[in-house]
Image: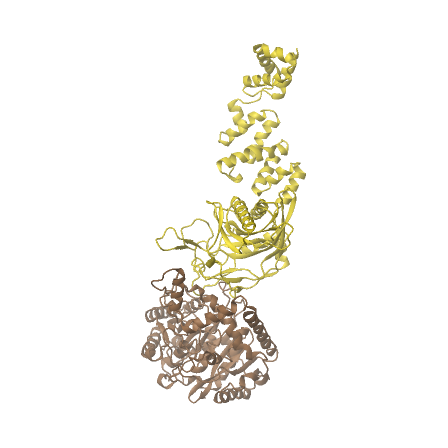
Chain colours: A yellow, B brown
Amino acid sequence: MSTDWEVVIGLEVHTQLATKSKIFSGSSTAYGAEPNTQASLIDLGYPGVLPVLNAEVVRMAAKFGLAVNATVAPRSIFARKNYFYPDLPKGYQISQLELPIVEHGELFIRDESGAEKRIGITRAHLEEDAGKSLHERFDKMSGIDLNRAGTPLLEIVSEPEMSSAKEAVAYMRKIHSIVRYLEISDGNMQEGSFRCDANVSVRPRGQKELGTRTEIKNLNSFRFVEKAINFEVERQIELIEDGGEVRLETRLYDSAKDETRPMRSKEEANDYRYFPDPDLLPVELDAEFIEAVRKTLPELPDAKKQRFVDQYQLKSADAEILTVSRALADYFETTAEKSAAVAQVAANWIVGGLSAALNKDGLDIRNSKIAADELAGLLDRIEDETISGKIAKEVFDAMWLGEGSADEIIAEKGLKQITDTGAIEKIVAAVIEANPGQATDYRAGKEKLLGFFVGQVMKETGGKANPGQVNEIIKRKLAE
Amino acid sequence: MGAAKEIHQRSLAELARGLDAGDFSSRELTVALLARIDEHQARLNAFITITGEEALARADIADKARASGDAGPLNGLPIAYKDLFCTKDVLTTCGSRILENFVSPYDATVVERLNSAGAVMLGKTNMDEFAMGSSNETSYYGPVTNPWNTKLSPGGSSGGSAAAVAARLTPAATGTDTGGSIRQPAALTGTVGLKATYGRVSRFGMVAFASSLDQAGVITRTAEDAAMLMGVMAGFDKRDSTSVDHPVADYVGGLSRPVKGLKIGIVRQHFDEGLDADCAEKVNAALAALKAEGATLIEIDLPNIDLSVPTYYVVAPAECSSNLSRFDGVRFGRRSENSEDLLDLYSRSRGEGFGAEVKRRIMTGTYVLSAGYYDAYYLKAQKVRQLISQDFRKAFANVDVIAGPTAPTTAFAIGEKTDDPITMYLNDIYTIGANLAGLPGISVPCGFADGLPVGLQLVGPHFAEEAILACAHQYQQLTDWHEQAPGEFA
């Protein structure tokens, strides 16, 4: 990318709120049901039916607002966004326009240089999701599944303050982390519970006014956000450098081709004719309600990370990784609390071996095959020198396969570290005797050979000898 | 007087007493009225659907309930529903072709409440399409005729309900009033029409025309009957967020409240040149009668009331343009055959399904909400609406009820105003203010001009149904206009 260009990105993140029932009806929001089995007369937009606001949705939105240091509006109103589409049963979507429930928030990410950067959150508003049109399964016809219709969404709109695809991803990850901490969304991207639209523009560095933006719709993975923005930035720069102009338009990202392309213009030429929905009363929240919600706020990622650094003396980078999700952070804390080992050791194991094993099996920390107290049990055996770090990896693998606790596996496989000096001395003597040439060379000053002897002793003991002791004994014996 | 009356001539209250006394069964009553409906349907076209079988089945249930001492407050009493109240397993057309095949899978709250009180549904009454009209001529199912002169319109949009009650086909029918649609037809047919306070009766299951104005009510021949029904229909419904959790008064018990001491506001603007002289005379005579009973008449001013019709014709179409979007031929109702693609399916289904007046209002509403026009029309109309509400609030600081004419003229000929929407709209000039301000209103018969009924309108403060019902009832104790039946249908 040419450095003459400055990139400006704003994101609209659509978060599905984790309520049991829909925003304006009692239908279930559970994912994956047979088409149209979770659509009531209200979701179907039948004549005469009326929406009734799910109070839980309001509580969740307020919680988000407080978590991002925003204003939770004492009065917000629902408006109708009018357009025709078969998966929009009423011919309008109930959303919020002029008075959204949340305004003027912020969060902090790391920019490309690693420095902290504030990103403003313009607003977050409540709305209902539409249904789904299915075009593939029906010959010359479309199927409509309205299970999704009426699912509560919180649309979180950022200021255009991100200046690279990486920052956009960092912002989106932060939102993802916050909504999951708050337990207001499962954040499941495969199921569409968390997705975003990206507004992207470029301008010559130093120029004040913004370039013409395009909006990339419906990005449902962090990777796609990054790739789509990168593609779009390059496309816009190339276009301008070739003397063209960026058109204000909506584009779709095609992940198979790794490109964005414009949506049909027919789909964007809508005048939505927003007006306040006369079927719903304004949402009025008093200070008491807001304070009650504030009391339910959990410790949030940034605060938790700082606490991990202060309380456990963790490396900042590890603290950041461990606090991405509440479940991971809890796992760490349980392990650290239950184990006699230094907390950083627990962190190393979780960020290292455990994360690798989870990734390999495609598991979430909540489904880890080794529970936090079990991992603590393993760390304690390292701490009390029952096993070496190297053997510990072997024990970990066995634990992962469900072969038992650390103690059971150590006992069963006879992995207990040999710490009996006499026993180690015997083995060392035998190794020196078996390798007279190397012993002579070592004594002549080739001290690098120490590693060779250690290796041989470890091989003889199946890695069970205490490495510190082995080192010391070899040195002593060869000096004799 | 009561003993000599035939069954169809009796009011709901009289029928209730007859049923209690065992003078007749609910089945006998239902059979008699169904026969009358059958006899006069061709001439009046008051019904879209007649639910004879269901009615008899319900009447039998009611008779059994009565026998076992398990009778609800309206046990075995007949009622007809304006065809925009959803009725389970019964056609609910809204007077529109687009719902010609729509059988509702559920009951409206109003229907549910009346059913559980034991009421017997006789059928669904004709109406202006989606309640848009003041003459019942916009119905896809043909115009309703006025029992007082079948060349004339019964008014609208609840014209079928009004004609059915006036012709003694049913003692009571529900209606809805978005901009006079209960009170104006009641005035034009010599019946009582009560529109409740906005939020008093649940709108759940009433097919929406303009959500911020729509409110249910009843058409009966007496205020007493209206009170009986309102006592059952009114009340909070958690399925309608705009319904209000306000205690329901004992409306029947409150009817005995005397007129003496009542402060009645007379709106200066309602007696200007727009009002037919004969109508004015009857309304003034009614006011004089109330004064003679001890009421005080106080002239009041509603400075912005002249703006109510234009305000209404921005707000109501705006909401209707959005409310009617769901009629797209996709999930229910009529779907046009042979459409080429999605857009074609929409335009054909809606083009063929909606009539001219509905289209006119959808177009108007779409226009006033469009980018660039919203502030000038919709927003401004909302501001004027606030001013009109304020005018009423100020007026009610000094008076208990506001009285005046319900409509500027008596019934007009079918076809007379169809080509001139503005004149048609002006028929609701005295009623629309109450809708914009969400106030309860009632029209009560107050005489005849050239043999055609004239209505006196009473409007009360929010939730003052009791006061206007009592005043109307007391007036009916002094007069017998409501006992006079149209000759052919006596």
Q: Quadrant of residue A104?
A: bottom right
Q: How many marks?
A: 0
Quarter of the image for the N terminus of chain A: give it.
top right
Q: Provide residue B102's location: percent of width, then percent of height.
A: 37, 65
Q: What residue occupies the far right of the structure in this picture? A: A310
> Left or right of A251: which side holds A69?
right
Front one among A362 and B368: B368
Q: Provide residue A449's location: percent of width, then percent of height.
A: 61, 16
> Left or right of A84: which side holds A311?
right
> In this rendering, does residue B105 appear at all?
no
> In this rendering, does residue B172 appear at all?
yes
> Left or right of B328: which side holds B314?
right
Quarter of the image for the C terminus of chain A: give it.
top right
Q: Is residue A31 above or below residue A377?
A: below
Q: Provide residue A153's location: percent of width, then percent of height.
A: 52, 54
Front one among B95 and B116: B95
Q: Provide residue B104's location: percent of width, then percent of height.
A: 39, 64
